Amino acid sequence: MHSDTARALAQVVKQYAADDIRVTVNQGYLLRFVKPEDLPAIYEALHALGLADPGFDTTADITTCPGTDTCNLAISSSYGITRALEQMMHEEFPDLVFNDDIKIKISGCMNGCGQHSVANIGYHGSSLKNGAYVLPALQVLLGGGFNCKGEGLIADKVIKIPAKRGPDSLRYLLRDFEANAFDGEYYSDYYARQGKNYFYQLLKPLADLKTLIDSDYIDWDHTEQYVTEVGIGECASVLIDLVATTLTEASEKLSWAREALVESRWSDALYHTYNVFITGARAALMSRDIPTNTQHGIVSDFDKTFVGSPDFHQEEGEFKALVFSINKQEPSEDFARRFLAQGEAFLQAVQAYREIQIEQEGLPELQALTQAQDS
Ligand code: SF4
């Protein structure tokens, strides 16, 4: 979605949906608070933005990860093959725009961010060698999702085919299901009834590398010859410094507290400062590999772990008394200013502590990341 459309959508959500939008696991947007009488108006507004096409969450609405468009771990163009499959279904199987019996999901590599292994029909990006040449490929997975008893199933890897034959593979599968499934039979039950080898045989002609043509060596949405290059992934196999991320979160909360103070919102300033203490303490505990599950646990563990440390408090219970003083005092201006100053000093102390720790002990996970990148 382009940013202009996203901004326009935000206005529609503000006007008709209580300014509340959720992103769903099947890559939809959920507007939860629309008045029934506003439905025609919101439909018109979404239609004007090109966001009211029918078919959400149907067979023709494929869930896909970004693939090679933006993910460096990807080895194939998930968006490209998704567009090709959706177009093919709109043209050749128009009923599927109104049918959600079969779910199709696609990932650009085996990490599965596009959820291919829990789909009725799944594809994940891969590559195939043909002599000295490499071509983009799709691993076809079948039989995942739910069966008629509501049991969840993990799909089987059935066969690997050249990526350009993806639309043919889906054609074969859909026609076969139309022709041979019982009335009302779930796809996962149909797969279980026929068995893996049946589908392997069905798709086998598409895996024949003797019939390759030049365009099979070029991935969907690409014009150049395919090469495999793998880097750091967008949403899998990513190494980050979680302590640094948590400290950034604490700094953000501190800036909210300062803003609230400037606007004389004393309760908000106190609440955000309280979160600075909790988030900062969580970062410090994480740096020592101490689990941080509840806010009370974080405060008690920080109290015990860092007692006597020159950077923090000297006596056990001191930190707890400071943080929970929020429950004991009126949300006055004076208290909000004092509490915020203490929160600022605390966060600075945690940041300084972390810098010294990295200097002295290094950062094993980032070192590992650097080594992985070098290799
Ligand atoms: S790591 Fe995730 S987002 Fe990246 S290609 Fe693999 S499945 Fe897709």
Image (cartoon, grey):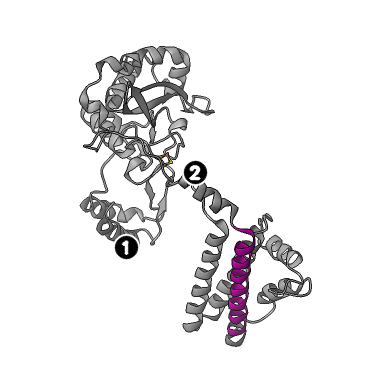
Across and down, in percent, residue 307 comes to 76, 69
Across and down, in percent, residue 269 comes to 54, 77
Among numbered discs 2 and 1, the one appearing first in the sequence: 1
- The residue at 55%/81% (across/down) is 266
Residue 300, located in which quarter of the rendered image? bottom right
Q: How many marks?
A: 2
Residue that numbered label 2 is attached to: 237
Q: Is residue 75 visible?
A: yes
Locate ligand 1 by image quadrant. top left
SS label for mark 1 = helix
Q: Are marks 2 and 1 in contact (CB under 8 Å)?
A: no
Identity of the amino acid at label 2?
Answer: Ser
Across and down, in percent, residue 85 comes to 28, 31
- Find the magenta span and give its range: 337-362
Relative to 182, is 218 on the left or the right? left
- The secondary structure that dominates the magenta segment is helix
Query: Few, some or many C-alpha atoms within 10 Å of disc 1 (few <14, some 14-19, many ≥20)?
Result: few
Residue that numbered label 1 is attached to: 15
Relative to 300, is 141 on the left or the right? left
Query: Few, some or many C-alpha atoms within 10 Å of disc 2 (few <14, some 14-19, many ≥20)?
Result: few
Point out the residue furthest to the right here.
315
Q: Is residue 280 visible?
A: no
Identity of the amino acid at label 1?
Answer: Gln
On whether residue 339 falls in the magenta region, the answer is yes
Instruction: Give how far apart the Cα atoms at labels 2 and 1 are.
Output: 40 Å
Mark 2 CB in 8 Å range of ligand 1?
yes
Mark 1 CB in 8 Å range of ligand 1?
no
SS label for mark 2 = loop
Q: Nearer the viewer, residue 118 or 341?
A: 341
